[in-house]
Image: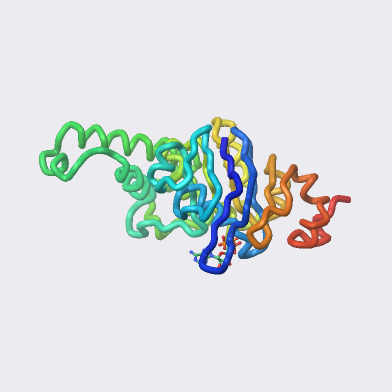
Amino acid sequence: MLEAHGLTKCFGGLTAVRDVTTSFEKNRINAIIGPNGAGKTTFFNLVSGYHKPTSGRIVFDGQDVTGLRPDQVAKLGVARTFQSTNLFDQATVLDNLIVGHRLRTTSTFWDVVFNTRRLREDEHRCRAKAEEVLDFVGLSSVAHHLAADISQEERKRVAFALALATDPKIVLLDEPAGGVNPEETLGLAELIRKMIRKGLTVCLIEHKMDMIMSLADKIVVLDHGEMIAEGTPAEIRSNQRVIEAYLGADYAAA
Ligand SMILES: Nc1ncnc2c1ncn2[C@@H]1O[C@H](COP(=O)(O)OP(=O)(O)OP(=O)(O)O)[C@@H](O)[C@H]1O
């Protein structure tokens, strides 16, 4: 569903992603792991159009999307979350979702001035979508709370909801369980499984190895921008190079 072919990104003299070729299958949970600075977020930035690759190609759903803008990539069905979720803290959770969705509707300034039927229909659609995705991520009960008042774990769920509101085919999650406790991490892992049951494809970056090892169908390991391994969790945890570069002896297969 998503393929990288010889993907490379240089920032001046630094090669953040170097000649990465891999693919992520439809309706699977894929993970990218590796030490800090390995190039994981840069890989997401390339795939979602935020950075243009220095060389290489990206193919999504059979279509070459190399060099497309973020909005064009998003329209094709690629959604992403960020390590930290910026919300309008003085607006409710529901309003944050509605605003996120409103930016993608077709009504114009004049529709607002004349309160046209198109505007009212757009508003209705946005609200319905916001309520649907908040229900999906389990946040209906805090829909009317101010974003400033929700927990870190709830912010993570709002990030998922914002991504899901775009009706994506694949969701790229950048550290979805960063800064949340172990019990909440299990809850977020369950939510990711629910996304798969809904037919979505997921690719996540995460440092929480227990979560990744129990969740991922496929793991790609980056180190200094290079892909040093790819495979199932069992293959990755017994890979000597990965153990040395990142996992340490704790995760070596018994
Ligand atoms: N916009 C940029 N300009 C210059 N250098 C950058 C830029 N973005 C990333 N880098 C550099 O590219 C390298 C890879 O960074 P990246 O953020 O992709 O790593 P990462 O694996 O996501 O790390 P972490 O786990 O800490 O989030 C780092 O050396 C980083 O400083």
Residue 198 percent across, percent down from the top left: 54, 31
Q: Quadrant of residue 208?
A: bottom right
Question: Where does residue 108 sit, x and y in percent of width and height?
Answer: 19, 42
**Residue in front for this viewpoint, 87 or 47:** 47
Question: 109 above or below 179?
Answer: above
The quarter holding residue 249 reads bottom right
The structure residue drawn at horizontal position 62% and vertical position 39%, both measured from the top left corner, is 24
Q: Residue at x 41, y 48 (%)?
A: 70
Relative to 112, is 81 on the left or the right?
Answer: right
Foreground pick, 228 / 79 = 228
- Residue 134, quarter of picture: top left
Q: Quadrant of ligand 1?
A: bottom right
Q: Residue at x 63, y 40 (%)?
A: 23
- Residue 42, image x and y in percent? 54, 57
Residue lying at the far front of the rendered structure: 55
147 to the left or right of 196: left
The quarter of the picture where the N terminus appears is: top right
User: Does residue 185 appear in the picture of this structure?
Assistant: yes
Does any portion of residue 158 appear in the rendered image? no
Can you say whether 109 is above or below 36 in the image?
A: above
- Residue plotted at (72% across, 46% down): 230
